[in-house]
Image: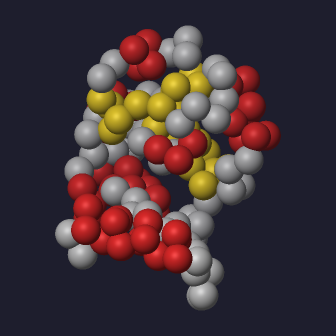
Amino acid sequence: MAMIFLNKPLAFGLAIRLTDLYGETILMVERGDTSYIDNLRDEIEENHPQIHIHDVPPYDFNVFNYAENTGRPMISVDLWDGIHPALVTLTCDWGKEYAVPYGILYAKDPTEHVMEFIHVMERVMGR
């Protein structure tokens, strides 16, 4: 995913390709924060020198405000969709290898309701 400042023409597209970001400076968390973003960073650095990367600290509201104030696209995940009123989250067509897996955290001794939910998720996800 990528969060794009609403005034950018890219904010009105359906899905972003890396070539759509040529000439842009994109915001990414620093190398080492997550291997999935590091893999995307490697792809950009090796094969898309037309995209410039600006490192930012782990995301917080200051980083989202910085994205808004600078108008720079920010690499993000679905989790942050809707977090800032001036940013929009767009689907990226970058291939499955850049997908970020999610999981569910719960207590070592979960309640019965939590275990019911986990079992439902296991069935839905086919695990």
**Location of residue 61 (image quadrant):** top right
- Can the viewer see residue 103? no
Location of residue 25 in the rendering, given as x and y in whole percent from the top left corner: 54, 35
Side of 37 where 87 appears, left or right: right
Q: Residue at x 50, y 15 (%)?
A: 8
Q: Residue at x 64, y 35 (%)?
A: 83
Side of 23 where 72 appears, left or right: right
In front: 70, or 49?
70
**Location of residue 74 (image quadrant):** top right
Location of residue 50 in the rendering, given as x and y in whole percent from the top left corner: 39, 37
Quarter the N terminus occupies: top left
Q: Compared to 118, does 72 lie above or below?
A: above
**Location of residue 51 (image quadrant):** top left
In front: 54, or 28?
28
Q: Residue at x 53, y 47 (%)?
A: 79
Quarter the C terminus occupies: bottom left
Q: Compared to 105, does 30 lie above or below?
A: above
Count of labels in the image: 0
Residue at the farthest right position: 62
Residue at the farthest front position: 112
Colour mode of the rendering: secondary structure
Q: Compared to 21, does 99 lie above or below?
A: below
Q: Compared to 5, does 30 lie above or below?
A: below
Q: Residue at x 55, y 11 (%)?
A: 7
Residue at the farthest bottom position: 108
In front: 20, or 80?
80
Location of residue 60 in the rendering, given as x and y in whole percent from the top left corner: 74, 47
- Can the viewer see residue 14? yes
Location of residue 57 in the rendering, given as x and y in whole percent from the top left corner: 71, 55
